[in-house]
Image (cartoon, rainbow, N blue to C red):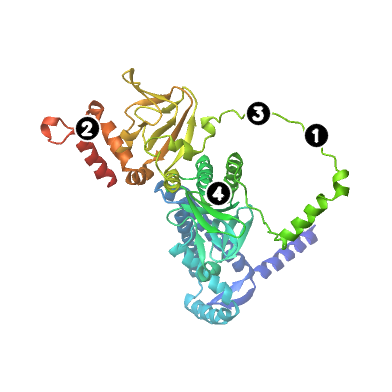
């Protein structure tokens, strides 16, 4: 038994001696195995504390001060590195290491390693630049070279970008400093999508414009301000080349929105019998007259005539097509039914179509409601609507084809003064506030008609504070309304 105790004591003494034996001396401090273990343990604790503090700042403190995600990540990363470096030097100082000698060694190592790790040093400096200068931030949607994705994390050496396919790509930081970067989220996230379309040469440009804009207005993720536009790019060899331009505010959705718009464009083209351009080749036949004479002589020969039996072709009555429903009319034809635009040329109607869009409302549907914000002006292309006050429980008016409503809230920037619902299936031409100015500038007759209609509703306008008593002004109500339109829209 005593022998076993002596053996255990001997092993313990040997192990203790192994831990306390001096291995080397650094910074005036002898290092043993136990000293190294303690030092590494304290450094790990310091790193853990630094990480915990930075995470607390990102998740709690900075969120309370309403910092955006990119700023939170940048401040948290810088805090983590600063606390880790401070903790490292405090531990070395408390361990009795002479930091002045450490500085000399670090300088010597830095010179040697600088040549061997140039890329690492470049990435380190680039990482510090990204964290402080913030040309890109966590959460930004960026494009570098052929890589497109969202920034997930920025570290000292590299940046993690999550692509649209959900793949995490690790990009060295120096690529963001040395290369041209497209940051779709920088300041204003709005971006414009270009969708090229080629149609057959016999297509009507105004119908193509209408179809493309109709498709754009049907996609809810497309912004109405700035409004969608259509460019006639060129007369191509095989097609008339157009381009639909739409604005979105969510750049990562570019591909899904483009796909949806392509589906909508194809459906609109099919409804309007617009042909998508296909590659074509023209064949020219020389000596056509000689070939026609030869064929005619062959057909008139006795052998061919005697053996040719004329077939009996049954006569099939052609059914008359039913009249086309107004809902299937082109927007160009519907606008021509309105007195303001009946004499407009195709080019003028093409510009007019870009100001607004057609919208079909079924019977008894509420179009706009009293006291709600109003940014749209409505022109009735077909059907009829009823204007009424829900608050007073009173009928106001019935409007028919060629009349308009919604102008008061657009002109005044106030809420809707009345509610409007359809009395039958109704087609409206909807113009947003930002496009109304262009419409009225190019169609002064419509602007005058709006002024006259507003002047007839004096009591409603007085309730809104637009009109003053005639005793206080020498101007007529019509003159005051026209002045108001001139002040707001500059026309």
Q: Which of marks 2 and 4 is nearer the N terminus?
A: 4
Foreground tag (1 vs 2):
1
* SS class, disc 2: loop
Spot occupied by residue 323 in the image (x, y as percentages of width and height): 56, 29
- Residue 312: give its label: 1
Residue 319 got which mark? Answer: 3
Q: Mark 2, mark 3: which one is toward the viewer?
A: 3
- Classed neighbour count for the residue bearing mark 2: other residues with Cα under 10 Å, few (<14), some (14–19), many (≥20): few
* One can see residue 127 in this view: yes
Mark before the other along the chain sequence, 2 or 3: 3
Q: Mark 2 points at which residue?
A: 465
Say which of marks 3 and 4 sits in front. 3
Left/right of residue 28 with respect to residue 409 in the rendered view: right
Q: How far apart are marks 2 and 4 (CA)?
A: 44 Å
**Residue hosting label 4:** 253
Instruction: Report if residue 52 is visible in the image.
Output: no
In the rendered image, which quarter contains the N terminus? bottom right
């Amino acid at each position: 038994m005593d022998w076993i105790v002596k053996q255990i004591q001997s092993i313990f003494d040997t192990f203790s001696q192994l831990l306390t034996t001096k291995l080397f001396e650094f910074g005036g401090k002898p290092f043993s195995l136990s000293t190294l273990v303690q030092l590494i343990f304290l450094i790990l604790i310091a790193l853990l504390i630094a990480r915990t503090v930075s995470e607390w700042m990102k998740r709690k403190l900075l969120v309370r001060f309403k910092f955006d995600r990119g700023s939170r990540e940048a401040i948290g990363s810088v805090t983590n590195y600063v606390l880790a470096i401070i903790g490292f030097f405090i531990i070395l100082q408390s361990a009795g290491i002479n930091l002045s000698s450490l500085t000399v060694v670090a300088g010597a190592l830095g010179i040697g390693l600088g040549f061997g790790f140039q890329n690492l040093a470049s990435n380190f400096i680039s990482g510090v630049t990204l964290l402080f200068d913030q040309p890109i931030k966590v959460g930004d949607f960026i494009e570098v070279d052929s890589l497109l994705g969202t920034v997930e994390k920025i570290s000292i050496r590299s940046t993690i970008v999550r692509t649209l396919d959900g793949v995490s790509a690790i990009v060295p930081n120096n690529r963001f400093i040395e290369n041209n970067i497209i940051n779709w989220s920088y300041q204003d996230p709005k971006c414009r999508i270009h969708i090229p379309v080629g149609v057959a040469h016999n297509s009507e440009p105004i119908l193509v414009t209408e179809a493309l804009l109709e498709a754009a207005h049907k996609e809810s993720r497309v912004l109405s301000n700035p409004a969608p536009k259509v460019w006639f790019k060129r007369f191509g060899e095989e097609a008339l080349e157009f381009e639909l331009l739409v604005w979105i505010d969510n750049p990562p959705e570019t591909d899904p929105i483009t796909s949806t718009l392509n589906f909508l464009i194809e459906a609109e083209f099919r409804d309007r019998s617009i042909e998508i351009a296909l590659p074509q080749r023209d064949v020219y036949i020389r000596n056509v007259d000689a070939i026609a004479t030869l064929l005619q002589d062959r057909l008139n020969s006795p052998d061919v005539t005697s053996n040719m039996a004329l077939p009996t072709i049954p006569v099939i009555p052609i059914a008359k097509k039913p009249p086309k429903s107004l809902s299937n009319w082109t927007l160009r034809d519907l606008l021509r039914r309105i007195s303001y635009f009946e004499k407009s040329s195709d080019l003028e109607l093409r510009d007019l179509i870009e100001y607004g869009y057609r919208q079909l409302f079924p019977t008894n549907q509420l179009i706009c409601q009293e006291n709600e914000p109003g940014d749209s002006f409505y022109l009735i292309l077909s059907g009829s609507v009823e204007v009424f006050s829900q608050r007073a429980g009173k009928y106001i008016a019935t409007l028919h084809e060629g009349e308009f409503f919604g102008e008061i809230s657009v002109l005044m920037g106030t809420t809707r003064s009345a509610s409007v619902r359809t009395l039958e299936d109704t087609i409206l031409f909807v113009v947003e506030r930002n496009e109304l100015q262009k419409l009225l500038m190019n169609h002064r007759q419509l602007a005058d008609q709006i002024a006259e209609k507003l002047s007839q509703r004096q009591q409603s306008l007085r309730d809104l504070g637009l009109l003053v008593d005639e005793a206080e002004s020498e101007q007529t109500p019509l003159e005051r309304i026209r002045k108001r339109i001139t002040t707001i829209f500059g026309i």
